Amino acid sequence: MTDFEDLLTWRESSTSGDAIAAAVEAATGTDDAALAVLSAADRIVVTGAGSSYYLAQVVASAARATTHRPVIAVPLSELILRPEGVLVAAVGGDAGREPVVIISLSGSTSEAVTVAERMRAAGHPTIAVTCRGGSPLASLADATLVSPAGDEAAIVMTRSFGSMLALLLGVVARVAGDDGLMTDLARLPGHWGDASAAAHVGRRLGATDWSRIVVLGGGPAFGIAAEWGLKLTETSQVPTSAYEPLEFRHGPISVCEPGMLVVGLVGGDGVAEEVAVVEEAARLGAQTWLIAGDEIEGGTTAGELSRIAGGLCSSARLPLLLHPGHALALALALTRGCDPDAPRHLGQVVILGSD
């Protein structure tokens, strides 16, 4: 059996703090062309596949709240198969004012390259977000944002997600002129210890072979919850679902029972209502784990409680929420006899049409 500390995926996740710090620094020197395109946009489309799509969801939600303009997230496949259902410019708008932000760790995923080619041909400005500046996607885009320390060798994304998220949040802050968000992002490295402490809780919880796991997150944190679900599914094959916290009450809460785990990524507006959902899941028999900032005063009737980056705004905290989920997923995979460094049926880069 592979030792946890020897996992490549864990070693790369554990360096996320440094990658996030480098990404925040890179955001302060963002290409002026990218800022100009985003600042002039009437509507912004953010897209990716797999983890990059969930990253797009996080960024779009945070950007809407920060810039107060239309920003949507869609999978790359929708821009290939059904662009008329995504692009306003496809039905008479100005393509030049509807940029498409394309996220891809490798910059080589076939859908990402195809979307860059098609959007460019249709007159939409494109911005690549990647960890590989020399990639095909970067060469096709009008502007490229590179996470300088986010690249990784593991099959599943870890530090690349958190670092590209920090980079994009920094860009959002600059477009919106939000100095508070930028200041809080610069403080993230000082809170990496909180993420590491929460990861220890994740490792301990991963020693139990849960029958089912549910991850709850609202607003931008919903994309983080979905990414936790993907990591748990692809590494351990445990049935995992992600929900908006209050939506969990509308039917799915019926699955609560002993032997399952409910994780709540809570914070910002509505935190009291979100905590109440997790506490209800605990009363119904599920093991629960709350991850919050400093919004929860005192204790909670839920099970585990981890505090991450208290004092920072809820958007700035987001890049630190990935590492505990990686710890849970990798530990659970080992508990179930799976090799999280070699998840079945998966490769790092998806090339459609390849053998």
Image (cartoon, rainbow, N blue to C red):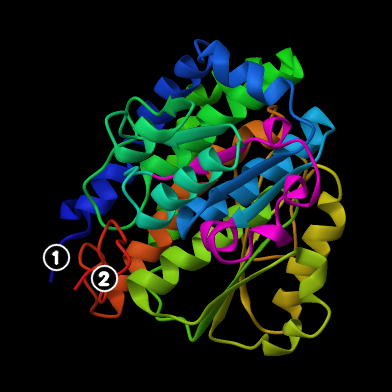
The earlier-in-sequence mark between 2 and 1 is 1
Q: Is residue 297 magenta?
A: no
Q: Out of 94 and 337, give the one closest to the viewer.
A: 94
In the rendered image of this protein, does residue 59 appear above or below residue 301? Answer: above
Q: Which numbered dot is residue 343?
A: 2
Mark 1 lies on a secondary structure that is loop
Taking the image as shown, residue 99 lies to the left or right of residue 209, namely: right
Taking the image as shown, residue 245 lies to the left or right of residue 145, namely: right
Q: Out of 319 and 177, give the one closest to the viewer.
A: 177
In the image, residue 108 lies at what x, y percent?
31, 47
Q: Nearer the viewer, mark 2 or mark 1?
A: 2
Say which quarter of the image contains residue 179.
Answer: top right
Query: Which amino acid type is shown beneath numbered disc 2?
Result: Pro
Taking the image as shown, residue 231 lies to the left or right of residue 182, namely: left
Residue 198, visible in the rendered structure:
no
For the C terminus, give its image quadrant: bottom left
Mark 2 lies on a secondary structure that is loop
In the image, residue 249 lies at what x, y percent?
82, 77
Residue depicted at x 52% and y 38%: 120
Decide: few, some or many residues near mark 2? Use Cα within 10 Å; few <14, some 14-19, many ≥20. some
Query: Which amino acid type is shown beneath numbered disc 1?
Result: Thr
Residue depicted at x 71% and y 39%: 62
Q: Out of 306 and 48, give the one closest to the viewer.
A: 48
Say which quarter of the image contains residue 209.
Answer: bottom left
In the image, residue 141 lies at what x, y percent?
45, 32
Residue numbers of the magenta segment: 75-104
In the rendered image of this protein, does residue 231 appear above or below residue 219? Answer: below
Which residue is disc 1 drawn over?
A: 2
Residue depicted at x 43% and y 73%: 233
Residue depicted at x 83% and y 80%: 250
Instruction: Give the Cα distance between marks 2 and 1.
Output: 14 Å
